[in-house]
Structure formats: structure tokens, C-alpha cells
């Protein structure tokens, strides 16, 4: 009986921790049809400790299509026949194209006030090329010890190498009251 109780306690504790670490994400434009769908954001530690490393891990899926090659081939196929045209469209939708570069723009707000911005090379935050399907973007950094504790909002935009916006999300995170470099 004791083994069953300890296993149930472990299971419920794990489920509670997984739920506690879940971060609610919102798309900047809820009506937009972004090429990259963000599945989740994990922040470690949560809340973030001032003066210590914090990691933001974003899991996503991409369905970027090879648009430039598509335009060239579509003109050729239109000259042939309609069935080949629809077959070509389906093959491009099925195959997609890997992301070989891009930018990640990050804006941070504190109680609605813009306090910080940074831009990163996509390939510096993820393994490039990013194939069609699931991928992860991970970014770690140490926040200064003087960073005010409280609730923050992060807005992240992802652009491909041609400056096309692939996704835009926002999510909240907290910076704790203790554990700063100044406190150590």
C-alpha cells in the first residue's frame, strides 16, 4: 500500500509541476495565418532569479513553402494542363522548404512599459536549416541583479531570411524577489 501511495504522490507532483511550468502564449494577431505555429514556451527557472541564468525554450512547427521556386514552376505548368497544375500545388504544400536563416526580435515590457529589445540570428538560437515540421528555439541569458522583480510580458517575432513575418507571440513571465547577485 505504501508503494502505491508514494507512486500516486509522485504522479500528482509531476503533473502539478508540469502544469505550473506551462506558460500561456497568445498570438499578436489572432486572425493571422502564421507559417510557424508555436506549441509552447518553457521558462527555467520559473520565476526567474535575478543575476542567474534563465532559459526560454520555445517549441514550434513550421510549414514554410518554397514560394520563389513555386512561382517559376507554376508558370511552366499552367502552359501544360490543369491536372499538372493541381499536382504541383500539392507537391509544394507537402514538401515545403527548410528555413536557412532569419531573425528573432524580442521586446520586453514591465507593467506595460517597454523596457528592453534585442534581435538574434535565428540560426544562433536554433539548428539551421530548420526543416519543415517541429523545431525548438532556446535562448539563455543572465538578467542583471538590479532587474526589478515582478511581472513582465515578452513579445517575440520570427522573420525568415526575406524579412517575412513567420509568427508573432506574447507571453508573460515573472522575475522573483530574491536571489540577485547583489543579494549574494
Image: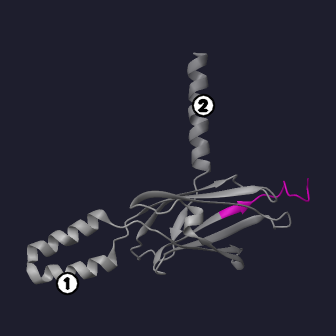
Residue indicated by mark 1: 75
Left or right, residue 28 beside residue 150 = left
CB contact under 8 Å: marks 1 and 2: no
Up/down of 55 relative to 31, above or below: above
Q: CA distance from mark 1 to mark 2?
A: 60 Å
Query: At which x and y percent is residue 86?
Result: 15, 72
Up/down of 86 relative to 71, above or below: above
**Local crowd at mark 1 within 10 Å, few (<14), some, or many (≥20)?**
few
Magenta stretch containing residue 175, yes or no? yes
Q: Secondary structure at mark 1?
A: helix
Residue, x 33% and y 66% (percent of image)?
96
Residue, x 9% and y 72% (percent of image)?
83
Residue indicated by mark 2: 10
Which corner quadrant of the image does residue 131 belong to?
bottom left
**Which label sits in the foreground, 1 or 2?**
1
The one nearer the camera, 182 or 172, is: 182
Up/down of 175 relative to 71, above or below: above
Magenta-highlighted residues: 173-184
Residue, x 81% and y 67% (percent of image)?
147
Query: At which x and y percent is residue 27?
Result: 49, 71
Magenta stretch containing residue 7, yes or no? no
Q: Main secondary structure of the magenta part?
A: loop
The one nearer the camera, 32 or 77, is: 77
Quadrant of the image containing the N terminus: top right
Q: How is the image coloured?
A: one colour
Tally the marks. 2
Which corner quadrant of the image does residue 148 belong to?
bottom right
Residue, x 11% and y 84% (percent of image)?
79
Q: Secondary structure at mark 2?
A: helix
Residue 48 visible: no
Query: At which x and y percent is residue 70?
Result: 27, 77
Query: At which x and y percent is residue 16?
Result: 60, 42
Amino acid at each position: 500500500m505504501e508503494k502505491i501511495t508514494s507512486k500516486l504522490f509522485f504522479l500528482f507532483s509531476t503533473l502539478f509541476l508540469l502544469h505550473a511550468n506551462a506558460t500561456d502564449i497568445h498570438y499578436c494577431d489572432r486572425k493571422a495565418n502564421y507559417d510557424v505555429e508555436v506549441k509552447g514556451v518553457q521558462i527555467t527557472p520559473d520565476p526567474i532569479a535575478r543575476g542567474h541564468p534563465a532559459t526560454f525554450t520555445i517549441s514550434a512547427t513550421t510549414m514554410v513553402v518554397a514560394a520563389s521556386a513555386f512561382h517559376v514552376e507554376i508558370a511552366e505548368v499552367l502552359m501544360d494542363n490543369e491536372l499538372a497544375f493541381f499536382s504541383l500545388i500539392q507537391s509544394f504544400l507537402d514538401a515545403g522548404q527548410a528555413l536557412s536563416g532569419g531573425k528573432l526580435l524580442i521586446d520586453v515590457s514591465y507593467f506595460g512599459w517597454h523596457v528592453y529589445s534585442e534581435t538574434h540570428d535565428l540560426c544562433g538560437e536554433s539548428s539551421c536549416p530548420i526543416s519543415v515540421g517541429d523545431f525548438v528555439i532556446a535562448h539563455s541569458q543572465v538578467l542583471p541583479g538590479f532587474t526589478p522583480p515582478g511581472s513582465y510580458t515578452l513579445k517575440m517575432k520570427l522573420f525568415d531570411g526575406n524579412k517575412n513575418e513567420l509568427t508573432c507571440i506574447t507571453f508573460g513571465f515573472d522575475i522573483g524577489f530574491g536571489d540577485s547577485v547583489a543579494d549574494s
